[in-house]
Amino acid sequence: MPEYFVRRYTELVKEKPGTDIIDTQLAYSIRFYCMGSVGMTQEWVLNDSITAGTGFTPCCFFPQSVFLSAAGDSH
């Protein structure tokens, strides 16, 4: 499942600066975020009975803005 999100966010980053080139650091950051968010979502679903969905959801989306912003700044 992380592969889907890696492809999706890579496409979004490529659209922003208008280029097909993503440097290795940004590509790593995307993979790191996607693999971590999928793993943590799985952990939350299976093991976390304390955190409400309304508290968990912002954690999933905040980092996206960080690397999308970085993509715009670096190109």
Image (cartoon, rainbow, N blue to C red):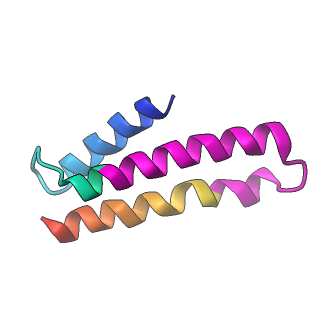
Name which residue lies at 48% across and 61% down: 63
* Residue sitting at x 62%, y 60%: 58
Does 54 appear in magenta?
yes
User: Is residue 37 magenta-colored?
Assistant: yes
Could you tell me residue 29's position as x and y percent?
37, 55
Decide if residue 4 is on the left or right side of residue 17: right
Please report the bounds of the magenta region as a residue range.
Answer: 28-57
Main SS category, magenta section: helix
Residue lying at 43% horizontally and 37% vertically, measured from the top left: 5
Task: State whether residue 21 is above or below residue 7.
Answer: below
Residue 12: % across, % down: 29, 46
In this view, the residue in front, 58 or 75, is 75
Q: Quadrant of the C terminus?
A: bottom left
Q: Position of residue 16 (x, y in %)?
A: 21, 54
Task: Give the side of residue 60 with respect to residue 13, left or right.
Answer: right
69 up-or-down from 54: above or below: below
- Quadrant location of residue 52? bottom right
Residue found farthest to the bottom? 73
Image quadrant in which you'd find residue 23: bottom left
Seen as rendered, the residue at the extreme right is 49
Q: Could you say where residue 19 lies in the image, as x and y percent from the top left?
A: 9, 49
